[in-house]
Amino acid sequence: MIIVDGPAELCGELTVQGAKNSTLPLLAAALLCKGQTVLHNCPDLSDVDTAVQILEHLGCRCKREGHDLIVDNAVTRCQIPEELMRGMRSSIVFLGAIIARCGEARLCSPGGCELGPRPIDLHLSSLRKLGVEIDESGGWLTCRTPEGIQGAYVSLSFPSVGATENLILAAVCGRGTTIIANAAREPEICDLCEYLNRCGGRVYGAGESCVIVDGVKELYGAEHRVMPDRIAAVTYMAAAAVTGGNITLRDVDNTHILPMLSPFEESGCEVRQLGGCLNIMAPRRLSAVKHIRTMPYPGFPTDAQPVVMSMAAVGRGTSVFVENIFESRYRHAEGLQRMGANIKVEGKVAVVEGVEGLTGAAVQAADLRGGAALVVAGLRAQGRTRVEGAEFIRRGYENLAGSLRDLGARVREE
C-alpha cells in the first residue's frame, strides 16, 4: 500500500530512472551475445528482477552492482517456467532471442497488468515468416527452427513494439536480410538497436517505419547505458502539475518528451528544456488538457494517459480522452471518481469535467500506470489517500514514494 497525505506542493530536483521498457528487451538481447553484457543505469524494478530470474533460469549468471547489471551469457535451457512468464506481460520479448540462441523455445502465455486483450498473434505470425515452426497447445508455445532463422519481408498489421523487438532479436543473427515494414518507432526500439549494433549487429532504420536487419554470425557482449524513462519523467511532471509545483528533472532526453508536452502546455504549465534537464512550473489551478488521443510513437503514448487524466480531473474545463491502444486502460477512472473526480467513460472515450479539488480515499491500483495516476491524484487531494496494489507500481517505478518525498510530498509505502 502507498499512503499519500495531501495536499502537497512539489519542489526540487530529481534524476529520472533508466527506462523499464528499454531494459527488458536489452536483457533479452544479452542472450544473443558471447561474453559479458554490462547495462548501466539499470532501474531497480520488480519487472527487471523477474527478467533477471528468467536469464538465470536459462543459464546466465547475473550480478547487480548498484545501477549496473552484469550478465554473463551461458545459456543451457530454452524453456521459461510458467511462474516467471506469468509474472510480467513483457516476458514475451524473450521469445525471439531464445529461438535465435537455441533454435527452439518453449514458453506459456505471459502475465502482468490486465489491460484487456494484448494478443501475441502478431508476434507468432511474424516469427513464422522467418521460418519458425510454432505449436500452440495446452497454453504453451513450442517453437523450432529446423533450418534456422531465414531473412524475410515482414509487414506488421500494427506497429507493435513487442513484435518489432521480437523480430529484430530473432533476425539479428539469422541468415540473410529481414525487412520489417510498419515497424514500431518508439525510442526504446532505437535503444535496443544501438546496443545490438555495438555488439556487432547490423540493424538499420531504427526509429523509422521500416527497419532492415542484415543477419550476422555472432554478437559479442558490450557495455551500454539504458536510456532515461520517458514515462517516469512524465509521471513526475504530472505530479508537479497537479500540485502547482516547480521541479527540475535531470537525465531527460527531451526529444522523447516532445510527444507528451501538449497537455502540460494546454493546462498552463511552463516547461523549459535545459540540455539534459527539464523544468516544469505549474499554475495554482490547471486548465483542461482538451483532447488526448493515444497513438503509437510519435503520437501520445498510452502509458502516459492515466497520469494526464489525473491532471484533467482537477483542471478547469472539459477534457476528452480517446484510448486507441488498449481496451481496458480506464480502470484508474473508478479510483479517481472515488476521490471526487467527474469522469464518464463510454467505450474508448472518457470525458473529464474538471473539479476544483479532490478528497483522499481508499483506492485500488489495477495496473502499473493507473496506480501511479492514483498516487499523483492523492498529492492534490485533501486528506489521506490509500492506494492498494503497490506491487503493480513497483513493476515500473523505482522507489516512487521516496522520490516524491524528496520533492516535498508526504508519501510512504507500507
Image (cartoon, grey):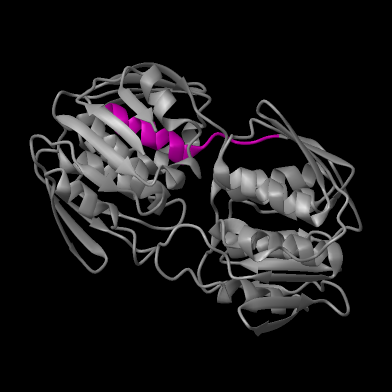
Q: Is residue 358 above or below residue 176?
A: above
Majority secondary structure in the magenta region: helix
Quadrant of res 87: bottom right
Residue 129 appears in view: no
Q: What span is in magenta?
A: 225-240
Residue 114 as seen in the image, left or right of residue 173:
left
Quarter residue 185 falls in? bottom right
The answer to whether residue 145 shows anywhere in this view is yes
The correct choice, above or below, for 215 with respect to 285 in the image is below
Residue 65 colored in magenta in the image? no
Q: Residue at x 50, y 45 (%)?
A: 395
Q: Nearer the viewer, residue 331 or 307?
A: 331
Name the residue at 31% across, 41% down.
387
Q: Using the image, determine if residue 217 lies above or below residue 394.
A: below
Which quadrant of the figure contains the C terminus? top left
Image x and y of residue 10, in percent? 29, 20
Residue shown at the point (73%, 43%) measured from the top left: 195
208 or 254: which is nearer to us?
254
Tell me residue 140's x, y (percent): 65, 77
- Residue 290: give x, y in percent of width and height: 18, 47
Asked whether, in this view, residue 317 is left or right of residue 398, the answer is left
Q: Nearer the viewer, residue 135 or 213?
A: 135
Please name whichever residue, 146 or 318, is drawn nearer the observer in this view of the structure: 146
